Image: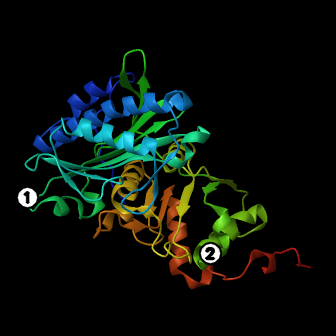
């Protein structure tokens, strides 16, 4: 069980700058807050680029290049990465790890914190006007250097969050004392506190997964989804709704608002055996936020925040959301009595039942 830290509630409408000033304590915490402020400046510029859509050019056009992990880059990926790097270079940040970089970059090796970023999560959705975002994780810098600063348990993060560029631009942030939601006030040019003590709703009837991959899933995931799809007549005893946006920050934002569970499991396809999302700069920050908000996050079995990366772009399966649902999915992986490795059509409760 995760024990949440707490801090006095800040007044709604408080600017992010004031919130961070009040939260800054020791040297590392001050540096973490300065890094968040720098990321917010970059996010406002990215929000403007995203908001201009086709008027700013073909953001979603592929550049003909791939990132370090082989995924195609679109124009806005590179622009977002450059804006984030430029902002963090002015903050007390030692090392910079990014989905768009081949290696960890050194900014100021003696600085107290190091930052890992997915500069533009969901960039394949740019042209369809779906919400996309920037995900970040902040670690204390280790004297041993760049890899030691990042290749450590996710539970050692000082702060984490994401910016989401949708109908409005928002920041979901944890400094290790709960989760707060900020919304960009375009008139003042600052993020303002909209909700403090954000909590993942415990009860839910929604799950998110790419069902087109059903045939590739391993038995525990198939059985969990089969049981949900059987609705009120099945073992779960209630009806569920399925969601899939294919934008990680949008999926997370819905869960913070309405609860539910998100699954991006490992499966049988080549290259997907160990999952597809990145451990360091996608799974770690989202797991940190979920646990700080009373939810959970695993790789299907193991708590994400106990994992230790061994590669910069290491991939992982990821399950996050309402704690009860995350725990139930883990149970499907470890309890043979729950798993049936055959299609639901031929289950006891089926179209061929008498």
Q: Residue furthest top?
A: 187
Is 141 left, or right, of 47 in this rendering?
left
State which quarter of the image contains the N terminus: bottom left
Residue position marked by numbered label 1 in the rendering: 143
Res 78 quadrant in image: top left
- The x and y percentages for residue 240 are 70, 56
Residue position marked by numbered label 2 in the rendering: 216
Q: Residue furthest front?
A: 64
Residue drawn where x is 23% and y is 59% of the image = 150
- Asked if 21 appears above or below 58 in the picture, the reply is above
Q: How is the image coloured?
A: rainbow
- The x and y percentages for residue 152 are 23, 64
Is 140 left, or right, of 289 in this rendering?
left
- Asked if 22 appears above or below 147 in the picture, the reply is above
Residue 80: assigned label: none
**Numbered label tally:** 2
Res 196 quadrant in image: top left
């Amino acid at each position: 069980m995760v024990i949440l830290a707490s801090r006095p509630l800040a007044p709604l409408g408080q600017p992010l700058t004031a919130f961070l000033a009040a939260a800054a304590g020791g040297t590392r915490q001050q540096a973490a807050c300065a890094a968040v402020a720098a990321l917010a400046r970059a996010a406002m510029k990215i929000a403007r680029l995203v908001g201009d859509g086709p008027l700013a050019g073909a953001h979603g056009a592929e550049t003909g290049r791939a990132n370090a992990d082989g995924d195609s880059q679109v124009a806005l990926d590179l622009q977002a990465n450059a804006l984030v790097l430029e902002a963090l270079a002015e903050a007390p940040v030692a090392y910079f790890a990014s989905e768009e970089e081949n290696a960890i970059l050194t900014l100021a090796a003696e600085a107290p914190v190091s930052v890992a970023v997915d500069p533009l999560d969901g960039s394949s959705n740019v042209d369809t006007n779906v919400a996309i975002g920037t995900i970040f994780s902040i670690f204390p810098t280790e004297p041993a250097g760049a890899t030691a600063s990042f290749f450590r348990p996710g539970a050692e993060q000082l702060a984490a969050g994401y910016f989401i560029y949708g109908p409005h631009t928002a920041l979901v942030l944890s400094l290790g004392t709960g989760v707060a939601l900020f919304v960009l006030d375009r008139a003042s040019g600052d993020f303002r506190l909209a909700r403090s003590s954000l909590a993942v709703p415990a009860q839910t009837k929604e799950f998110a997964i790419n069902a087109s991959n059903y045939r590739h899933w391993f038995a525990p995931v198939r059985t969990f989804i089969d049981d949900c799809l059987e609705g009120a007549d099945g073992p779960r005893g209630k009806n569920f709704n399925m969601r899939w946006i294919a934008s990680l920050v949008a999926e997370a934002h819905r869960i913070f608002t309405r609860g539910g569970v998100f699954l991006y499991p490992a499966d049988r396809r080549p290259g997907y055996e160990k999952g597809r999302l990145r451990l360091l700069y996608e799974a770690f920050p989202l797991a940190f936020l979920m646990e700080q908000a009373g939810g959970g996050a695993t790789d299907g079995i193991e708590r994400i925040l106990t994992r230790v990366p061994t590669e910069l772009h290491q991939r992982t399966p990821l399950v996050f959301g309402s704690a009860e649902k995350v725990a139930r999915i883990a149970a499907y992986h470890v309890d043979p009595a729950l798993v049936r490795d055959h299609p639901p059509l031929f289950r006891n409760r089926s179209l061929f039942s008498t």
